[in-house]
Amino acid sequence: MFKKFTLVFSAILLLAIVTQAQDRFCKVWYTEGGESKVQIYLAADGKYCGKIVWLKNGIVKGQPLIDKKNPDETKRHRPWLGLPIISGLVKKSPTEIVSGKIYDPSHGNYYNCKMTLKDPNLLELRGYILGVSFLGRTTTWYLAEDNDKPAAIPAPAELGPGSVIKNDKNL
């Protein structure tokens, strides 16, 4: 009996791992205009999150962009590279994740958001206010990588004065 339970439990665990690995949202996406890449991933709580993993122009006057407009003063020192900007999305269907938040570091604002996969290489993100989807804006993101691992990027702690973030040559 214990062997059967272990076998069934192992099969379910393996299926969960394979399903997560094949998730069509958990990839690296170019934001509209190709100015940055965002990696979407499944967090430990089962919700979708996203962080900035590449910036076309991540250095200004020799310094990395920082989250200087964040409404929380204690977070205004954080570099944009590695910045979590998407949180709390849940899967509604195989092509839609909903009920999340997105942060715009260029203005320091948070918005409700949902995402719809239009095809394997095209993701529509709708940011809106007051919980009403029609009070918002839709942007289109394009698949940046064929897998869910971005190109090597220095961790924010490795950035010091005069550090340079190399741009992606494929853009």
Image (cartoon, rainbow, N blue to C red):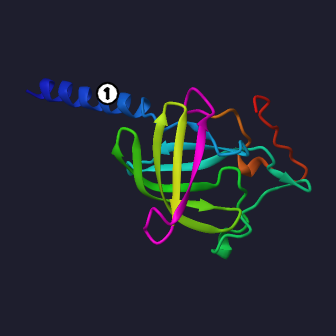
Q: Which quadrant would the N terminus be assigned to in this image? A: top left
Point 75% across, 61% down: residue: 66
Image height check: is 108 above or below 13?
Answer: below
Q: Which residues are magenta?
A: 129-149
Point 47% across, 48% down: residue: 115
Residue 141 on image: x %, y %: 59, 42
Front residue of this view, candidates 7 and 110: 110
Mark 1, Cα crowd under 10 Å, few <14 / some 14-19 / many 20+, is: few
Image height check: is 154 above or below 84?
Answer: above
Along the horizontal axis of the image, is 150 left or right of 163? left
Residue 5 on image: x %, y %: 14, 29
Kindly tell me whether residue 5 is visible in this rendering: yes
Image height check: is 119 above or below 45?
Answer: above
Could you tell me the amino acid type at mark 1?
Leu
Furthest residue toward left = 1
Along the horizontal axis of the image, is 16 left or right of 87? left
SS at circle 1: helix
Query: Which residue does the numbered mark 1 point to in the structure image?
Result: 14
Along the horizontal axis of the image, is 8 left or right of 117? left
Main secondary-structure element of the magenta-colored stretch:
loop
Residue 17 on image: x %, y %: 37, 31
Residue 49 on image: x %, y %: 50, 50
* The image quarter in which residue 146 lies: top right
Kindly tell me whether residue 160 is visible in this rendering: no
Point 21% across, 31% down: residue: 9
Point 55% across, 28% down: residue: 147
Furthest residue toward front = 134
Residue 130 on the magenta span: yes
